[in-house]
Amino acid sequence: MNRPYGRFFLPGPVEVRPEVLAAQLQPMTGHRGPDVQAFIGELQAGLKDAFRTERPVFIVPCSGTGLMEAAIRNGASNRVLSLVNGAFSKRFSSIASQCGLEVDEVSIPWGEAHDPDQVSTALSVRKYDAVTVAHSETSTGVLNDLQMLSGIVHQHEETLLLVDSVSGAAGAELQTDLWGLDFVLTGGQKAFSVPPGVSFGVASSSMIERAKEVGGRGYYFDLVRYFENIEKLQTPTTPPLSTLFALQVQLRLMAKETMEGRWARHQEMAERTWAWVEEMASLGIQLKVVAAEGHRSPTVTAIQVPDGVSAPSIVDAVKDRGWVIGGGYGKLKPTTFRIGHMGEHTEDALEGLLSVLAEILS
Ligand SMILES: *Cc1c(COP(=O)(O)O)cnc(C)c1O
């Protein structure tokens, strides 16, 4: 694969910087002992900054879905309310069902963000152990308002808010402590821009207390064990060392940019993409951003193609020209494509992609 750097706009995994990829070539080390504790300590500092938390950040060898399952198995033992507005938030709901919990859904049209009154009403009907939500719903490009949702959920003392921020963290503003989020999980291969294979999670003290009470939370994803280990700068099992070598270099680069700088860069790329859709529409090419205005994710945009056009054929045509974008996800596959403007991309590179797309569409 001789693709030049900067042309890979999949909404995960994302383009990884060459120096970050190269960091994986370091020789192995044992995963216990003072050297490794210093190494994990450095990673903790960068990860805490990304999540905006004083709590330890779990480093778990799995993809994002693994920590979605961990969220459910540690955060609930009875009934869960799942906020569903796309394929990934639906997956959260399905995981809860598959883990044997009672699940109710607040299900809204794909492309919309959750509404405070509707969620508040649902919570007033029954007692829930937890509410699940996708921060940035990668199938539609919708961003849910976590601060607002947290305020509503926490009017109910026993209810925890479990957040899938797989395509949010390190790209969209995320304030774990300030917003009072009980569990936030992400995968390294999205806006964090490291190779796949590692995920990160932050649990509030209520989440850890809950986990201790939940029977049968299992072994591999037992967050109490993760918590006890990370306090000693250790991991319960062998960490994905090569991916963590990459993460170390990536976190240093992220510290240079600052998290605020990173959020702003993502927002600019997203706004440029939305403006381009408008430009195309004004030229008679009827593209449409799937996500409702005012509720759009800074990391990914799903774009609906004109009637009669096949979205997969556009994805293929882009590929033929040496660039990569994402196909539509789930039921949106035939009618949408997705641009993952997340990770290390710049507006310049994005401009290159948009002109390729414009050429194909016209
Ligand atoms: C990518 C993604 C997932 C799934 O992550 P995997 O790492 O593939 O398991 C879950 N939720 C959201 C919002 C995602 O974008």
Image (spheres, rainbow, N blue to C red):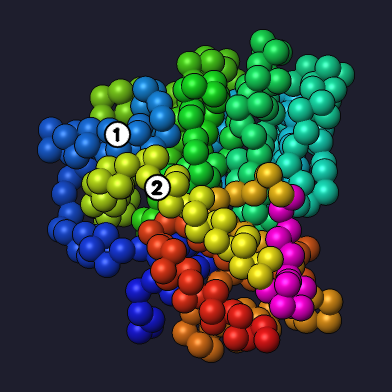
Pick out the residue farthest to the bottom. 320
Q: Where in the figure is residue 282, as x and y percent of width and height?
A: 73, 72
- Magenta stretch bounds: 280-292
Provide the residue designation for mark 1: 44
Using a 10 Å C-alpha cutoff, classify the residue at mark 2 as few (fewer than 14 neighbours), some (14 to 19) or many (20 or more).
Answer: many
Question: Looking at the picture, which amino acid does disc 2 mark?
Answer: Arg
Pick out the residue farthest to the top. 157
Asked whether the viewer can see residue 201, the reply is yes
Q: Nearer the viewer, residue 16 or 210?
A: 16
Give above or below for 164 relative to 245.
Answer: above
Q: Is 259 on the left-hand or right-hand side of 316?
A: left
- What residue appears at the point 43 percent right and 74 percent down from the top-left corner? 7
| Quarter of the image where one finds residue 308 | bottom right
Q: What's the magenta bit mostly, secondary-structure-wise?
A: loop
Between the C-alphas of marks 1 and 2, the distance is 18 Å
Q: Is mark 2 within 8 Å of ligand 1?
A: no
